[in-house]
Image (cartoon, grey):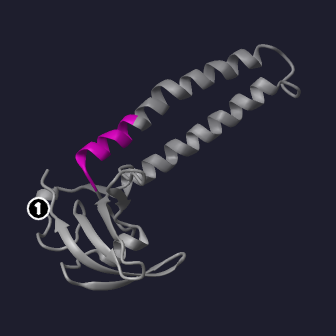
């Protein structure tokens, strides 16, 4: 059975809109460009034709990945999540016990991640999030990540409301 991941209604709608855009606008445009290139004659040496066929394949792959991502999600009500512990939708402040720096993370669903903001939005399925989920203020945790082990202490949990 595939693990299902929480996602907000906004994140779900964003993924659905991206799929709609690719299927209803991008693919028909590529199909037209393929037809135009095919009309130019010899397909063996028609670089435009081959480029558009490749673009079509890449777009179909992207649509397939987005649909798979969407199928593995469920719309979560942040206000129904348990309070006082790290869950989907929480904003968590942790102290990195190795360097003493405070870091702030928001736990989000697929398509909602943003690693550039002041509060880093990370996927609940990421190793870091998996190590912190269900922890409470004061808990210390060691998290296995691809680069090794990270040690944190949970300092604050902000429960988010929808």
Q: In the rendered image, which quarter contains the N terminus? A: bottom left
Residue 15: say if magenta: yes
Residue plotted at (42% across, 36% down): 18
Classified by dominant secondary structure, the portion drawn in magenta counts as: helix
Q: Is residue 155 above or below residue 79?
A: below
Q: Is residue 34 left or right of residue 95?
A: right
The quadrant in which residue 151 appears is bottom left
**Image spot of residue 123 (x, y percent):** 37, 61
User: How many numbered markers are drawn?
Assistant: 1
In the image shown, does 122 or 155 lie closer to the viewer? 155
Q: Is residue 132 left or right of residue 54?
A: left
**Image spot of residue 147 (x, y percent):** 54, 76
Q: Is residue 136 left or right of residue 49?
A: left
Q: Is residue 134 above or below residue 123?
A: below
Magenta segment range?
A: 7-17
The quadrant in which residue 78 appears is bottom left
**Image spot of residue 37 (x, y percent):** 75, 18
Asked which secondary structure carries label 1, the reply is helix
Q: Circle 1: is it few (<14), some (14-19), or many (20+) Cα within 10 Å?
A: few
Q: Is residue 144 left or right of residue 139?
A: right
The quadrant in which residue 110 appears is bottom left
Residue plotted at (53% across, 27% down): 26
Residue plotted at (43% across, 47% down): 67
Read off the residue under disc 1.
80
Residue 50: say if magenta: no
Residue plotted at (25% across, 50% down): 8
**Image spot of residue 108 (x, y percent):** 31, 57
């Amino acid at each position: 059975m595939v693990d299902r991941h929480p996602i907000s209604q906004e994140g779900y709608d964003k993924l659905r809109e991206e799929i709609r855009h690719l299927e209803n606008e991008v693919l028909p445009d590529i199909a037209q460009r393929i037809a135009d290139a095919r009309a130019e004659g010899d397909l063996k040496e028609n670089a435009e034709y081959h480029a558009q066929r490749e673009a079509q394949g890449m777009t179909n792959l992207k649509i397939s990945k987005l649909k798979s991502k969407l199928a593995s999600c469920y719309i979560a009500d942040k206000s129904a999540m348990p309070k006082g512990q790290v869950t989907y939708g929480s904003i968590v402040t942790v102290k990195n016990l190795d360097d003493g720096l405070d870091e702030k993370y928001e736990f989000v669903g697929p398509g909602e991640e943003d690693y550039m903001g002041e509060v880093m939005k990370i996927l609940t399925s990421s190793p870091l999030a998996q190590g912190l989920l269900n922890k409470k203020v004061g808990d210390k945790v060691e998290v296995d990540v691809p680069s090794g082990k990270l040690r944190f202490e949970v300092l604050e949990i902000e429960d988010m409301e929808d």
